[in-house]
Structures are given as C-alpha cells and as structure tokens.
C-alpha cells in the first residue's frame, strides 16, 4: 500500500545466504515497526504484542527432568567420550597393525610362530600394544579430570571466579562400569581386526591399504554418533547402538543424554562380547596363515583363502 517501506541491497557482490537472511530479518523488523506506528499502536503496546510467551519443557516422566546446565555437561561428556573412543581405536589400532607388519617384514614372526600358537601371539600382541597405548591415553584423561576438578578451588584461592556454567551429570558406579566395558570391548574388537589385517601384508607401506575398511567402519560409527548426539531418542540411533561396531560410540552417548534401561545396556554388551569372541576366532585363523604369507597382494579373496587354509 501507499507509504510502505521498500529496501534495496547494494554491494560489490551478490549477498550470501547468511547475509541475505540477516538483512531480510532487519528489514522485516523495520517494516513491521513502521506499520504498527502508522496504525496508531505505540512502542509499549507493540512490545507487549510481540513479547515471547512463557515456555517450559517438561518430560512425561518427572524422573527424567534435568537441569539445563546438567544436560549441557552431559552433552559435552558424551561428545568427549565419542572422540576418546574414536581416537583410541584409530591411533592404537594402527599401532597394532604396524607392529605386526614390522615383525613380519623383519622375519621375526617366523621365530615367534614356533614358540607359541597364533591365537596366543594375537592375544599377546593386542593386549601388549593395547595396554601400552591405553596407559598413555588414560594419563591424558586423568590429567583432564584432575584439571576440571581442581579448577574451582584453584580459582577461589587466586580470588577469581571459577564457577563453571556447565555442571557434569551425576555418574553412578553402574554407568562408569558400563562406559569402561563398552570402551574396552570396542577397543579390543577393533584391535583384534587391526592385528589380523596387519598380518596380511608383507611391507609396512601396505598397512594402510589393509586397514582401510576398518578405518572406514570406525569413521562411520564416529560420524553416526555425532549426528545421534543431537537426536539421541531417534529410532535409528537406538538400533545402531546395538550394532557391535557402533555400540562403543552410541550406547554411552545414549546413556548420558536419554533414558536407557539396564536391559538394553546388557543386551548391547552381550552382542559386543559375542562379536568379539567371533572376531578372535576368525582373526586367529587369518593371523596364523597371514604371518607366513610374503609377497602376496592383500584382498578379500586372500583373506578368505587364508582363513580356510588355517582351519
């Protein structure tokens, strides 16, 4: 109508989507204010009209009610657990595979295989390399926890405010045990497969090719977890949290961000444990044949043939 405000954007280049939204929002606010003023509605009346309504989010079950600061702490902790699990699996899984490949390339494996069974060598390699790596990793985690706990008293002694707006959720012994179980079982599962993959190469340079599918599988769980952190109640998140290669990432996050029954947790742990046992059986067969294979190209057919020969 007559008297309506009109706006033009002048710039050296076309506006980006973000800039377009920003300018459009500001122009809309100005236009609405102008229309209200021409309609005889004062500023106070306009503010009363556009004042946001009171909004309170309440869970269906009062027992699930959580303080916003505590939920923020739970989200950060879930985020940290996903990163910790992914980095441990990726870093020390590759370490295990590299270690196996080094022993094989140096012909040390030919001597070791005569002193112990392949399953014993595989178990020792996974536990030894894994324990060394986890010791270093746990030292970093312990330092982070000590720093967080000591932040408030140190700040008070220095006369500055050390109160964090984010509070960590209450963690009971059951949750801590479950977190540890998912982490350890997931780590050993991936490390076992990494060791088997490392035994299938004759040169250290070929390790990355052999472990490529495992890296992809771990990254799939990692990215699925980050998406699931925003929708922990989604059905697909619940389903994937029972898949053994994804449960070490997703189930601890679900435990922190939503209500998960103990039965679900125990079922997920049982599936993960059974998968680990099956992986150990298959990996030991691959390992026993792979450590004595030299000069052969790594592939699914080679792995399948090795597992059949070593039965």
Image (cartoon, rainbow, N blue to C red):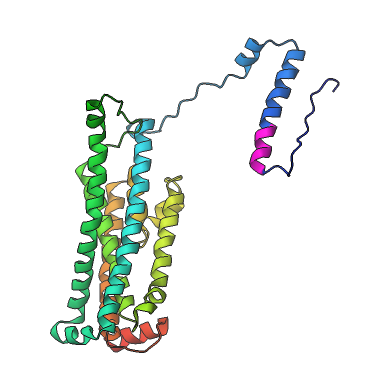
Q: Position of residue 222 (x, y in %)?
A: 41, 57
- Dominant SS of magenta comes to helix
Q: Residue at x 35, y 82 (%)?
A: 203
Q: Position of residue 307 (x, y in %)?
A: 31, 83
Is any part of residue 259 visible from this angle? Answer: no
Q: Is residue 15 above or below residue 235?
A: above
Q: Is residue 134 above or below residue 160?
A: below
- In the rendered image, residue 253 lying in the magenta stretch gets the answer no
- In the rendered image, residue 21 lying in the magenta stretch gets the answer yes
Horizontal side of residue 166 vs 3, given as left or right: left
Image quarter where the N terminus lies is top right
Horizontal side of residue 54 vs 264, given as left or right: right
Is any part of residue 234 visible from this angle? Answer: yes
Dividing the picture into quadrants, the one containing residue 258 is: top left
Image quarter where the C terminus lies is bottom left
Q: Residue at x 66, y 43 (%)?
A: 17
Dividing the picture into quadrants, the one containing residue 290 is: bottom left
Q: Residue at x 31, y 26 (%)?
A: 161
Q: Position of residue 142 (x, y in %)?
A: 22, 47
Q: Residue at x 28, y 78 (%)?
A: 102
Segment tinted magenta in the rendering:
17-24
Horizontal side of residue 205 vs 119, given as left or right: right
Nearer-the-camera pick, 191 or 209:
209
């Amino acid at each position: 109508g007559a008297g309506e405000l009109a706006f033009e954007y002048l710039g050296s280049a076309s506006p980006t989507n973000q800039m377009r939204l920003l300018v459009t929002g500001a122009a809309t606010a100005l236009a609405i204010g102008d229309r209200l003023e021409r309609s005889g509605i004062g500023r106070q009346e306009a503010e009363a009209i556009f004042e946001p309504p009171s909004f309170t989010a309440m869970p269906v079950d009062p027992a699930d009610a959580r303080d916003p600061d505590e939920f923020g702490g739970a989200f950060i902790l879930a985020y940290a657990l996903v990163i910790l699990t992914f980095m441990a699996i990726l870093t020390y899984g590759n370490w295990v595979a590299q270690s196996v490949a080094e022993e094989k390339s140096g012909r040390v494996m030919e001597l070791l295989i005569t002193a112990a069974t392949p399953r014993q060598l595989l178990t020792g390699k996974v536990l030894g390399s894994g324990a060394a790596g986890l010791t270093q990793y746990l030292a970093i985690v312990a330092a982070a926890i000590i720093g967080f706990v000591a932040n408030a008293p140190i700040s008070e002694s220095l006369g500055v405010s050390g109160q964090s707006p984010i509070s960590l959720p209450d963690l009971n012994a059951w949750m801590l045990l479950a977190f540890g179980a998912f982490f350890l079982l997931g780590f050993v599962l991936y490390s076992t497969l990494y060791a088997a993959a490392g035994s299938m190469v004759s040169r250290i340079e070929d390790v990355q090719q052999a472990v490529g599918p495992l890296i992809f599988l771990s990254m799939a769980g990692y990215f699925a977890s980050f998406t699931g952190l925003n929708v922990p109640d989604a059905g697909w998140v619940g389903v994937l949290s029972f898949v053994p290669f994804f449960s070490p990432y997703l189930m601890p996050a679900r435990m922190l961000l939503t209500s998960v029954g103990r039965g679900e947790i125990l079922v997920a742990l049982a599936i993960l444990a059974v998968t680990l046992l099956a992986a150990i059986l298959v990996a030991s067969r691959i390992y026993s044949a792979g450590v004595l294979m030299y000069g052969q190209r790594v592939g699914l057919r080679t792995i399948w043939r090795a597992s059949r020969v070593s039965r």
